[in-house]
Every structure is written in structure tokens, then in C-alpha cells.
Image (cartoon, rainbow, N blue to C red):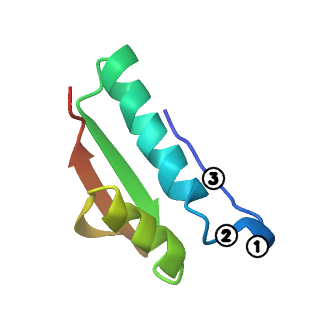
Amino acid sequence: MNVGYFVFAEHRGNGYATSAVELLLQHLARDTQYTAATLLIDPEKEASLAVARRCGFNRRDDVRGQRYFSRLISR
């Protein structure tokens, strides 16, 4: 499963992306058998990198010029 998100400029900085990622992680834990979640983020997208940190993702490597993050899904 792949998921992407975009927050319009006038709505950024309100925690919507962080909340959306946290809700998705809760859904994955409750309703699926997934055991890990991963992110690929453009290194210039500072806000998305901050979302990854706030949601407990750990940077693992770079993949095709993107920052690669992962975290276990808590049950």
C-alpha cells in the first residue's frame, strides 16, 4: 500500500499531516497485519521530514535520492 499527502499552504503548520500519519498508523495497527511502516521523503521537504520525526520514524538510508524512514507498528 502506498499513501501520499499534500497540505495546502494556508493550512500548513496546524498539525494536520502529523495527525493524518498518526491516524494511519493507528489504522494499520488495529485493522491490518502490517508490522512496519516506511516513508520516502524528498530531502528538501523539511516539513515532511519533521512529520516523520514527530511520528517516531527513524531514518534508515537514502533510496534514489529520497530519505528512507521506517518504524514498527505498535499493537
Q: Nearer the viewer, residue 1 or 10?
A: 10
Q: From this viewpoint, is residue 64 visible?
A: no
| Location of residue 68 in the rendering, given as x and y in whole percent from the top left corner | 33, 63
Q: Residues within 10 Å of mark 2 (few under 14, many from 20)?
A: few
Density class for disc 3 (Cα within 10 Å; few <14, some 14-19, many ≥20) is few
In the rendered image, which residue does mark 2 sit on? Answer: 12
Q: Of tags 1 and 3, which is closer to the observer? A: 1
Tell me how far mark 2 sits from mark 1, CA to CA: 5 Å
Tag 1 residue: 9
- Camera-side residue: 6 or 26? 26
Q: Residue 34 lies in what quarter of the image?
A: top left
Question: Residue 39 in the image: x percent, y percent?
Answer: 40, 55
Whether residue 34 sits left or right of residue 47 in the image: it is left
Q: Which residue is mark 3?
A: 5
Which three-letter amino acid code belongs to the residue tagged 2?
Answer: Arg
> What residue is rendered at 46% in x and 36% in y?
24
Q: In which quadrant of the rendered image does the C terminus lie? A: top left
Q: Are marks 2 and 1 in contact (CB under 8 Å)?
A: yes
